Image (cartoon, helix red, strand yellow):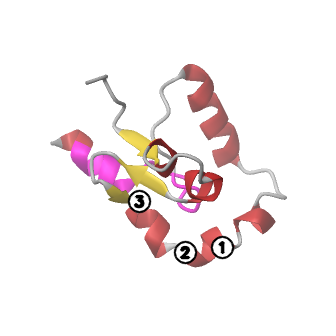
């Protein structure tokens, strides 16, 4: 089996569904949608409005992707996924 990073998106499990790939972060460690995503559903529903304004988290995610070491950043929380942090400590 290929080596997998600790976090991923639903796109790696459900190919062809672009909406899920963009909006449902899935932690490999937890094998479930990110807890912060679930708690902040209302913010995620309005994410297009939030994207109109530059945010530090966007630049942080871009730098992480470029470096090839992107921890799963929850769009609403703008921080690493809580399930990812919990599993990293184990």
Along the horizontal axis of the image, is 22 left or right of 11? Answer: right
What range is drawn magenta here? 74-87
Residue 32 vertical placement versus 45 (above, below) = above
Residue assigned mark 1: 45
Q: Please, what secondary structure does the residue beneath circle 3 have?
A: loop
Residue 24 vertical placement versus 70 (above, below) = below
Residue assigned mark 3: 34
Q: Residues within 10 Å of mark 3 (few under 14, many from 20)?
A: many
Quarter of the image for the N terminus: give it.
top left
Looking at the image, which residue is at 15% across and 42% down? 90
Q: Mark 3 or mark 2, which has the lower sequence index?
A: 3
Q: Is mark 1 in CB contact (under 8 Å) with mark 2?
A: yes
Q: Please, what secondary structure does the residue beneath circle 1 have?
A: helix
Along the horizontal axis of the image, is 75 left or right of 49? Answer: left
Q: Residues within 10 Å of mark 2 (few under 14, many from 20)?
A: few
Looking at the image, which residue is at 23% across and 46% down? 87
Residue 85 place in picture, x, y as percent: 31, 47
């Amino acid at each position: 089996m290929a080596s997998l990073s600790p976090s991923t998106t639903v796109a790696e499990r459900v190919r062809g569904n672009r909406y899920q790939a963009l909006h449902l972060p899935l932690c490999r460690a937890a094998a479930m949608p990110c807890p912060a995503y679930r708690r902040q559903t209302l913010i995620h529903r309005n994410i297009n409005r939030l994207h109109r304004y530059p945010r530090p988290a966007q630049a942080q995610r871009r730098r992480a992707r470029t470096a090839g070491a992107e921890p799963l950043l929850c769009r609403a929380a703008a921080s690493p996924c809580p399930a990812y942090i919990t599993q990293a400590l184990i």
